[in-house]
Amino acid sequence: MLNQTFWEKTLKTNLSSQRNFPNEELCRFLGRNNFQKKNNIKVLELGCGTGSNIPVLLFYKMKITGIDFSNESIKICKKKFKSKKNVKFKLFDMLKIHEMKEKYDLIIDVFSSYNLNSSQNDILLKGIQKKLKKNGIFFTYTPSKNSTSWKKEFHKFDKSTIKKFTRKQSPYYGNKGYFRFISLPEIKKKMNNINLKIQYCEKVIKTYNNGKEIFEFIVIEAKK
Ligand SMILES: C[S@@+](CC[C@H](N)C(=O)[O-])C[C@H]1O[C@@H](n2cnc3c(N)ncnc32)[C@H](O)[C@@H]1O
């Protein structure tokens, strides 16, 4: 699987490409939902990478499960957080989420599920719906089709996915494997299809190459 090989290599040889600190939108989400006042929250992070988001989840005293399909990711995370209770890491493909035994109050996807193509993403979303507890929340931070990288790429794998970037200007040039983008109407429809109610929906726009290249993310918070 191309994505898996890509991530295994990246996490072994190019760790500087990974954030050391939690995603800002995730921090804002946790803050505005008053998670400091909630107890025993069970959270699942899909594609936990090098564990950059884990410290903020620990800060809110959550019971954390991080999954990733990269051996290297799980090795790094286990080492980094070995002294911490209430956090476990599992080598696991998010596409098999429906096989997980537990249910969660919170499932987070910070720039991870974009590695799935459109039909794989539909499988994941059905699994998320199954594994969320009643009133559970799904948080996602995912690439938007308003990004120049999507608009200017012509080699598309399906209606939302490219398999590699051909433009060197693209911020993710060099990525290998599926890279999926979504639009606001599409994500709204998908949340509706799995009976999750959107509570928060915003865009984060970044620019690159002195403002010539736009890369946009969609931030969604949806409740079961
Ligand atoms: C860009 S990194 C993001 C890591 C982390 N969420 C963060 O915010 O720092 C994407 C991660 O998703 C993982 N990933 C991609 N596809 C996956 C899959 N099908 N199952 C589990 N993990 C996956 C990759 O191995 C990688 O660690």
Image: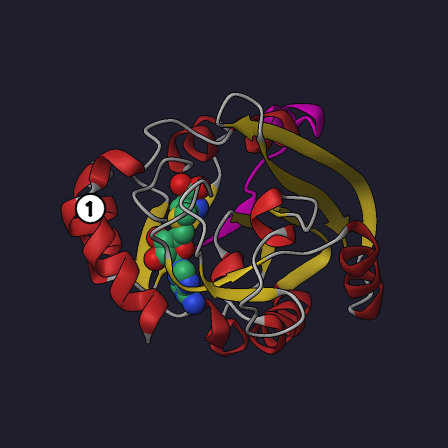
As helix, strand or loop, the secondary structure at mark 1 comes to helix
Residues in magenta, as a range? 30-48
Rendered-image quadrant of the C terminus: bottom right
Residue 23 drawn at (x, y percent): 49, 31
Closer to the camera, 136 or 173? 173
Up-down relation of residue 119 to residue 106 (above or below): below
Compared to 71, does 172 lie above or below? Answer: above
- The kind of residue on which mark 1 rests is Ile
Residue at the (57%, 27%) spot, across then down? 207
Horizontal and vertical percent position of residue 94: 46, 67
The quadrant the N terminus occupies is bottom left
Q: Is residue 186 above or below residue 152?
A: below
Quadrant location of ligand 1? bottom left
Front-lying residue, 198 or 55:
198
Question: Does 46 appear in magenta?
Answer: yes
Which residue shows up at 38% across the image and 26% down it? Answer: 21
Examine the structure image and report whether residue 38 is included in the region drawn in magenta. Answer: yes
Report if residue 66 is visible in the image: no
Task: Residue 220: give x, y in percent of width and height.
Answer: 71, 44
* 177 lies left or right of 82: right
Of residue 189 and residue 176, the one placed in the foreground of this image is: 176
Rendered view: 191 above or below 198: below
Specify whether residue 156 is in view.
yes
Residue beneath label 1, please?
76
Image spot of residue 58 (x, y percent) = 42, 32
